[in-house]
Image (tube, rainbow, N blue to C red):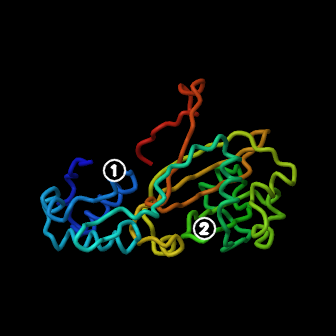
Amino acid sequence: MNAPTPAFLATKGTSLHRQLFLVLRDQIMQGLFADGALPKEEALCERFGVSRITVRRALADLAAQGLVERRHGRGTFVSPDLPLQRAAPSLSVLESLRKTAQETEVRVLEVEQGTPPPEVASLLVLAPGAKAVHALRLRSEIGGPPALLTDVWVPLDVGQKVTAAALKKKALYEMLMAQGIQFGRVVQEISAVVADPVRAGLLQTEVGSPLLRLVRLMHDMDERPVLHLTAYMAAERSRILMEIPGATINTLSAGQIVHGA
């Protein structure tokens, strides 16, 4: 399948072979090469207006990441081990949390009491200077690369039992439910950020690469904010799925695009 040639291959600041790598990687992950074969080098040179050296460097980078196989005299083919099947959307936030906990292993990086950033404190409706429990965790696919870096704040009275030892055994939402909290309304914000050196290192991606950022504010049944979570995911390995019931299509439940700060 011939996808439209992107016009940004002349963009300054990023090498041509890197730009071509990103384009081809995106097309591979979308399953655009139905027969598994990428176009020949000559065809890629013509389509994108780049040299053969540029094409070969891009294909070498794809091969280094296990996305393609280069077969001498035959061409370049999508790796047969590539997981291209998209999972069905989860039916609920709690089901999604449960699935994530079951399918990943956690590394607890930090658990401490501290003063949250002003924006987080405001969303949690905390008094000025009030402390909260802060937990930083890295979830990885079992036997695979890091999948999710989570930065969580919970009010002190809610998170008193949250410890590093406890988080290694049980997911945070399960701990809160075990102490009687029933989750109600959830507000989510999805945006994109650039990977800084710390997050890039933890998520095993490149500095400056795009990250998906999900900010989730969870309330209890009395409308009290009880958990503020910020999750970071490498964009090339992650997607965020949503299911919007028809009855809520004209409400904020269906989402709203906000421009500016």
**Front residue of this view, candidates 148 and 164:** 148
Residue 43 location in percent, x, y? Answer: 16, 59
**Real-space CA distance between mark 1 and mark 2, rounded to the nearest whole angstrom:** 28 Å
At x 58% / y 52%, what residue is drawn?
A: 215
Residue 227 location in percent, x, y? Answer: 71, 53
**Front residue of this view, candidates 195 and 5:** 5
Residue 25 is left or right of residue 156, and the answer is left
At x 79% / y 69%, what residue is drawn?
A: 163
Q: Badge 2 local density, few (<14 within 10 Å), some, or many (20+)?
A: many
Residue 211 location in percent, x, y? Answer: 46, 60
At x 72% / y 54%, what residue is drawn?
A: 127
Q: Name above or below for residue 158 compared with residue 259.
A: below
Tell which residue pokes out farthest to the front in this image.
73
Residue 90 is left or right of residue 6, and the answer is right
Q: What is the number of the mark on residue 2?
A: none
Q: For residue 44, what is the image quadrant?
A: bottom left
Type of the residue with mark 1: Leu
Q: Earlier in the sequence, mark 1 or mark 2?
A: 1
Tell which residue pokes out farthest to the right in this image.
179
Which residue carries the number 1 mark? 32
Type of the residue with mark 2: Ser
Mark 1 against mark 2, which lies toward the viewer?
1
Q: Name above or below for residue 129 compared with residue 191.
A: below
